[in-house]
Structure formats: C-alpha cells, structure tokens
Amino acid sequence: MSQVPGFIELEKELLPYRKILAQAADVIINENVSKYPIFIIHQQELDMGLALIEAGEKLKWSVNASTLEEFVTKKLVFMDRVQEFISAYKDPEQYLCLFVLSELGAQFIYIRRD
C-alpha cells in the first residue's frame, strides 16, 4: 500500500473520529448492508454514500460512509476487479478502509481501528 501525501496528518486528524467510523463500519456489517464498508474522505461536494462527518473548524475533511457495492454501481470499482478488491480488503474488525479524494487524485488506504 502506498501512502498518500499527508497521510500521517490525515490519520492524526481522523483520530478523534475513529470510534465513530468503527461504529458505522459495525452497523454496515451487522445490518447486512455490506461486508465491505468504505469511508470516503473528501473536501468537495460529493453525491455518494451517507454523510457522517462534515468538514469544519476542527476537521478539514468530510467523511461519507459507503460500500463496495456502491463503488461497483458507480463504476469506481469495475466488476472484473471485485475479486481483486476483496482479496486486498483488510479485516474490517481491525482496519477502516478509506477512499481519499484529494487534489492529487484518489486512493484507497487503511488505518487501524484503535
């Protein structure tokens, strides 16, 4: 996994919100919405997922909750790449899957839940 520029800063910034993201991941999994929750980290308007955290004074990023299924529907992950994605997806009981949209592009990264 390559690191997005500013990853350490992003991880520190998200630290206070990790519990909220972990709880949201648990709901997505436990309610059988998806086995693959994905949190979209962004700074622009986004018509995808459900808004969890809005950017503000303390956090310059907004966070939306989504799923692998929505990424496939929106053609961000192509059907022929789903198995590859699932193979690379880290244990959601230990990691949070983030899809970071920045001025440098988009990238999947994982951060520990705790």
Image (cartoon, rainbow, N blue to C red):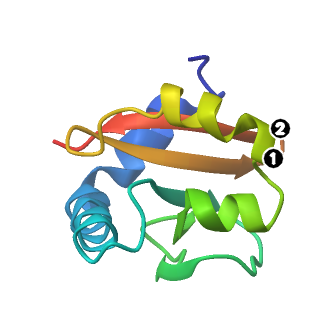
Dot 2 falls on a residue whose secondary structure is: loop
Residue that lies at the very extreme toward the top in this rendered image: 2
Dot 1 falls on a residue whose secondary structure is: loop
Locate residue 113: give its quadrant.
Answer: top left
Q: Nearer the viewer, residue 85 or 40?
A: 85
Locate residue 55: give its quadrant.
Answer: bottom right
Query: Residue at the location (25% across, 68% down)?
Result: 20
Q: Nearer the viewer, residue 60 or 99?
A: 99
Which one is closest to the eye, mark 1 or mark 2? 1
In x, y percent, where is residue 88?
A: 51, 26
Report whether 59 appears left or right of 77: left
Locate residue 97: give its quadrant.
Answer: top left
* Mark 2 crowdedness (10 Å alpha carbons): few <14, some 14-19, many ≥20: few
In the rendered image, the vertical position of residue 56 relative to residue 79, given as above or below: below
In the rendered image, the vertical position of residue 20 relative to residue 109, given as above or below: below
Q: Is residue 32 visible?
A: yes
Instruction: Please give the label number shown on residue 104.
Output: 2
Q: Tag 2: residue type?
A: Leu
Query: Residue at the location (42% across, 64% down)?
Result: 34
The quadrant the N terminus occupies is top right
**Residue pointed to by mark 1:** 78
